[in-house]
Image: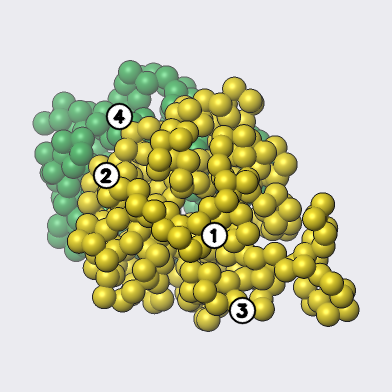
Amino acid sequence: MLCKRIIPCLDCDLAYPEGRVVKGVEFKQIKYAGIPWILAEKYYREGADEIVFLDITASHEKRETMVRVVEKTAKNVFIPITVGGGIKSLKDARRVFKAGADKVSINTAAIKNPKFVSDLSRYFGSQACVVAIDAKRRRVDDPSQVEDKVVVKTPEGEFWFECSIYGGRVFTGIDAIKWAMKVEELGAGEILLTSMDRDGTKEGYDIYLTKAVNDRLHIPVIASGGCGKPEHMLEVFKETDVSAALAASIFHYNTYPIPVVKRFLKEKGVPIRL
Amino acid sequence: MRVAIIDYGLGNIRSVYNAVRYVGGEPVVAENPNDAWGDALIIPGVGAFRDGVMNLSRFLPAIERHLNLKRPILGICLGLQMFFERSEEDSKAKGLGIIKGEVVKIKTPYKLPHIGWNLVKVENKECPLFRGLEEGFAYFVHSYHAVPKEPVTVATTEYGCKVTAAVWKGNVFGTQFHPERSGEFGLKILENFLKFCYSLK
């Protein structure tokens, strides 16, 4: 029986020599959490199933810093490592793979150039190509205006989901659910699905978004955005068939350490690696 | 102890390199067949069978020489699959044929690829790779698995059907999962592999 994966996400600000893990709220306010490779190793020892580094600065000059962070981490961390943020070319990808990453996560570059998804999966294998989707709820007032969108019914009303790029700064008008189906076709190996409405709120994952995407795909989906307590992970695993749940702040500030979360889920009957 | 990791352009070499070093080996990345020698060889790899076989072909003389010297070899994931005669994934590409049998698509009601952590059960406790281990969680990424025609399966996992997780034939070892990405359990397996290599010296 395949286990559900618990993935700590380390948002990295690389304006510092060794980088800093920070946490934003709804993609804005920022709070310091630690040094990337030290935190990653701690999570590995505590039983994380995978580590995700996201370069939130995503600037070209700091690319070398991310490579160093990955190199340092990979020496002592023996679980899959994913790196995202500002990866635009096969050359960028090759550099982080060479440093020890197993997968790269792409968002903006995929939307601007969908062929990049197929190129990545052809050169490095689909297992190495994660497409990150940052989705925002858009209320449907007039159904005739959104005929080309996938509309999802929720207790709060009807919504479609819009893809955002550049770390939540730019909206694209692209339907997130349709985009997820498209990138699966292009060769993406996994989807990292973040609800922008929930990110940093600690109110729980957007179950409606997560289910709408996961039910339509065969590739694994990682639920992200909004986890504030272990019960939220339980909810997403009970209500949807996602493969993994990602969280940041509940781990960073030791609110709920990884072993506590994993034991809780296991006791509730979720297949978990302990 | 020199462990040559064959770099034929597919797969994450760095993580294998780091893991071998972590458990006390001296890893060397062999991009050139002339460097593919040592106390042990590792064939890592992810991706398609056909690409794997094609890219590995220039290393075949080095692998053959290594095997003739009765030195151990470890295939990981696609590396394991290439030990077999053929794969359903591509009927035209021939495997190394070191182990009789073929590689077939996993017959499961669940999603493929089989990605993530699954419980590996050791079926043959004599196998040096699993010394001191009965079961443990390991990281898998694959859609195909080996169906040997000889009794070489030493560990399995469950994914809607029984999946071959590891094989052993003489000095040839293979794991379908990624020991270099399977935490303490995987490191223990790599350490056992090195210990076995050391015992032959």
Tell me the distance, in whole angstroms, between the alpha carbons under discs 2 and 4. Answer: 23 Å
For disc 2, the neighbor class at 10 Å (few under 14, some 14 to 19, many from 20) is some
Q: Name which of mark 3 and mark 1 comes first in the sequence.
A: 1
Does residue A274 appear in the picture of this structure?
A: yes
Tell me the distance, in whole angstroms, between the alpha carbons under discs 3 and 4. Answer: 48 Å
**Mark 3 falls on what kind of element?**
strand
Give the amino acid type for the residue marked by disc 1 in the picture: Glu
Chain B takes which shade in the image? green
Q: With A11 as the anchor, is A214 left or right in this view?
A: right
The residue lying toward the viewer, choosing from B187 and A88, is A88
Tell me the distance, in whole angstroms, between the alpha carbons under discs 2 and 3. Answer: 36 Å
Mark nearest the camera among 3 and 4 is 3
Q: Which chain does the numbered disc 1 sit on?
A: A
- Is there one chain holding both mark 2 and mark 4? no
For disc 1, the neighbor class at 10 Å (few under 14, some 14 to 19, many from 20) is some
**Mark 2 falls on what kind of element?**
helix
**Mark 4 falls on what kind of element?**
helix
Q: Name which of mark 1 and mark 2 comes first in the sequence.
A: 1
Give the amino acid type for the residue marked by disc 2 in the picture: Ile
Residue topped by disc 3: A172
Q: Mark 1 and mark 3 in contact (Cβ < 8 Å)?
A: no
Q: What mark, if any, has residue B188 been given in the picture? A: 4
Chain A takes which shade in the image? yellow
Residue topped by disc 2: A38
Tell me the distance, in whole angstroms, between the alpha carbons under discs 1 and 2. Answer: 25 Å
Q: Which chain does the numbered disc 4 sit on?
A: B
